[in-house]
Amino acid sequence: MEPREWTRERTVLCVMVLLFVLSLVYLVFSDSGLIKVWRLGDQVTALNDEIAQLHSENNELAREIEQLSGDDARITREIRERLGMVEPGETVFVFDAHVNTAQR
């Protein structure tokens, strides 16, 4: 069997295959390639999950605001519990919950 001659058609074919392979490598591994697109897709999914959680939290806070509107007693209770505020003239006693009563 005789070796085939290197023809112009074979040269063109090799160049086209080489360009295709280089294009494929660029398409997969470049800054805007498929790997980056897949990673960005994962980030989009995570951000959508976070958005859904924040919407839920906003709805819960809106319900709480609605419940607090016009309920001065509850507003006062929430201020006392959450912020530790007291009315003028009140005395606050703070007890250490971690003190072992057996040591006394």
Image (spheres, rainbow, N blue to C red):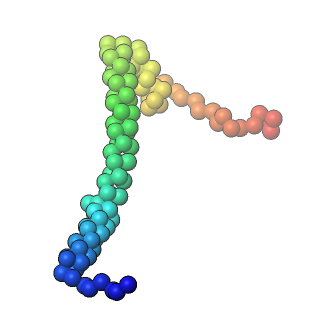
From the image, which quarter does the N terminus lie in?
bottom left
Q: State the residue at coordinates (37%, 28%).
A: 56
Q: Nearer the viewer, residue 81 or 56?
A: 56
Task: Give the x, y percent position of residue 27.
Answer: 28, 62
Task: Give the x, y percent position of residue 104.
Answer: 80, 36
The answer to whether residue 51 is left or right of residue 12 is right
Instruction: Please say whether residue 93 is visible from this viewpoint.
Output: yes
Instruction: Please say whether residue 19 is visible from this viewpoint.
Output: no
In this rendering, the answer to whether 34 lies above or below 95 is: below
Task: Give the x, y percent position of residue 76.
Answer: 41, 20
In this rendering, the answer to whether 52 lies above or below 36 is: above
Task: Give the x, y percent position of residue 24.
Answer: 29, 65
In this rendering, the answer to whether 93 lies above or below 18 is: above
Residue 57 sits in quarter? top left
Q: State the residue at coordinates (46%, 25%).
A: 80
Q: Nearer the viewer, residue 50 or 97?
A: 50
The answer to whether residue 24 is left or right of residue 74 is left
Q: State the residue at coordinates (66%, 34%).
A: 97
Q: State the residue at coordinates (34%, 86%).
A: 2
Residue 23 sits in quarter? bottom left
In this rendering, the answer to whether 69 lies above or below 54 is: above
